[in-house]
């Protein structure tokens, strides 16, 4: 098989890149190790930054998002039994975010890719990228048991944090910056109408809690739990009781309970692989970086990377210049480190480390008080949350 851009992985990064390239008249092939059902059902992120929303619309992939997604103009912060709204448009000159699940973004992009004529191969597992430092990189892969080779001009590794493409960057040239947290998030999906129409981020002495949503009838809820917690060790009643305790605040609407349909624990870590490019191999999304989920930056960063690659490739075709392709890693990393900063700060602001000294608790409260009483501090949060322009 031969193509211009070989895309490994059909998560949001790979699927959106395929769509952007199709619109630009560049042919590409997508290899995905899992089946379509799995990709469309994997419960992950739920908040799209303003820039992501704009990109999906411009790519002709925003129709259902605009119909079914829920525009959010703010979030609520809760701590010490108090509630504080952060108004995004007022603080950012009109920016907002969209609650629209990653599962739905993937479903929309898969449908478009198949309508665009593919190729999008499910159950096609990339085994290795060869010749990344040549003009003809190749992806060796196994499709339903049969080994094959995809010959490309460029390979984009969109294969997530456990992917294989990163391994093609020689160890001597790679640096990985990492941080792990002593806690994770227990995330549940519940058939219960959200108790509040905006997201609620709560800091509590017992740990962080987040009230999010997937639709007017489905809630998505998270609890900070110690690292290594088994989701099955929490029964449904205990989850609701703990959520109720952590988000309690004067005048807050009561939490609506309902049957829990899914639960899992996500470990929390940060990592950045530098550089994000080696020869004609470009890493994008979780294949290059992981952020802790606080602040919902993971999917949005993946979008930023593939937009940067698609622009750089089109620039080359229009001008003959490789300058933007050569600058891909540096351009993406600037944004990635800003998102790392934002996610790490928000994580530190709202979570309680198991061995946090009382001094740290007081500091957290002082930071929250500053954030909720000073417009400049709130503006910084609102700008970070709604995202930098692409
Ligand atoms: P992925 O979505 O991981 O896609 C990579 C794709 O590559 C997958 O489909 C995978 O099957 C495929 N693949 C892997 N290896 C190969 C191979 N060898 N050959 C072919 N295909 C391969 N972000 C938030 O903002 N909020 C959240 O609540 C949140 N929760 C998360 C929960 C979990 C369990 C995880 C893992 C991530 C979560 N994230 C969350 C982060 C967010 O979902 C990711 O940042 C986003 O999915 C990145 O998209 P991606 O396309 O780069 O990678
Ligand atoms: C969701 C996840 C996040 O990490 C976040 O900060 C907000 C919302 C969600 O899955 O809905």
Image (tube, rainbow, N blue to C red):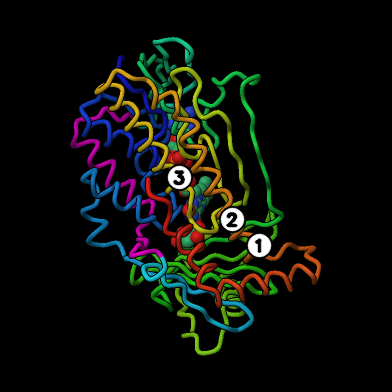
Does the numbered disc 1 mark a residue whose Cβ is under 8 Å from ligand 1?
Answer: no
- Which SS class for mark 3? helix
Pointer 3 residue: 301
Residue drawn 56% across and 21% down? 169
Q: CA distance from mark 3 to mark 1?
A: 25 Å
Q: Give neighbour class at mark 2: few <14, some 14-19, many 20+ (Cα, 10 Å).
A: many
Q: Nearer the viewer, mark 3 or mark 1?
A: 3
In the depicted structure, whether residue 388 falls above or below residue 142: below
Residues tagged 2 and 1 counted as in contact (Cβ below 8 A): yes
Determine the residue located farthest toward the bottom in the rendered image: 251
Residue 55's x, y, as percent?
A: 30, 46
Magenta-colored stretch includes residue 186:
no
User: Which SS class for mark 2?
Assistant: strand
Compute the Cα span from label 2 to label 1: 8 Å
Identify whether 96 is placed above or below 331. Answer: below
Task: Report the quarter where the N terminus lies.
Answer: top left
Name the quadrant containing residue 234: bottom right
Q: Position of residue 251 (x, y in %)?
A: 50, 89
């Amino acid at each position: 098989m031969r193509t211009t851009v070989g895309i490994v992985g059909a998560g949001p990064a790979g699927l959106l890149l395929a769509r952007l390239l199709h619109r630009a008249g560049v042919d590409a092939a997508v290899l995905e190790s899992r089946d379509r059902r799995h990709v469309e059902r994997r419960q992950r992120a739920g908040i799209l930054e303003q820039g992501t929303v704009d990109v999906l619309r411009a790519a002709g992939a925003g129709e259902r998002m605009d119909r079914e997604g829920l525009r959010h103009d703010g979030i609520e912060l809760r701590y010490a039994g108090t509630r504080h709204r952060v108004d995004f448009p007022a603080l950012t000159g009109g920016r907002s975010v969209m609650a629209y699940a990653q599962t739905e973004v993937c479903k929309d992009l898969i449908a478009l890719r198949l309508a665009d004529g593919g190729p999008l191969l499910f159950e096609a597992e990339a085994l290795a990228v060869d010749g990344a430092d040549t003009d003809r990189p190749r992806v060796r892969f196994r499709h339903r048991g049969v080994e094959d080779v995809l010959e490309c001009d460029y390979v984009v590794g969109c294969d997530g944090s456990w992917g294989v493409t990163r391994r093609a960057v020689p160890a001597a040239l790679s640096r990985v910056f990492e941080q792990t947290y002593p806690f994770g998030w227990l995330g549940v999906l519940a058939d219960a109408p959200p108790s509040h129409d905006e997201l609620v981020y709560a800091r509590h002495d017992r740990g962080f809690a987040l009230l999010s949503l997937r639709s007017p009838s489905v809630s998505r809820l998270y609890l900070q739990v110690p690292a290594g917690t088994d989701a099955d060790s929490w029964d449904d009643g205990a989850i609701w009781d703990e959520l109720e305790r952590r988000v309690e605040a004067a005048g807050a609407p009561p939490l609506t309970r309902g049957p829990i349909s899914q639960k899992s624990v996500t470990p929390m870590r940060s990592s950045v692989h530098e550089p994000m490019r080696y020869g004609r191999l470009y890493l994008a999304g979780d294949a290059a970086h992981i952020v802790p989920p606080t602040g919902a930056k993971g999917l949005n960063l993946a979008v930023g990377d593939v937009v940067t690659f698609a622009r750089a490739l089109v620039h080359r075709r229009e001008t003959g210049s490789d300058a933007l392709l050569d600058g891909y890693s540096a351009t993406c990393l600037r944004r990635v480190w800003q998102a790392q900063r934002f996610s790490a700060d928000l994580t530190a602001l709202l979570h309680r480390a198991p061995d946090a000294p009382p001094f740290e608790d007081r500091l957290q409260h002082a930071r929250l008080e500053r954030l909720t009483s000073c417009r400049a501090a709130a503006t910084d949060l609102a700008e970070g949350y709604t995202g930098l322009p692409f």
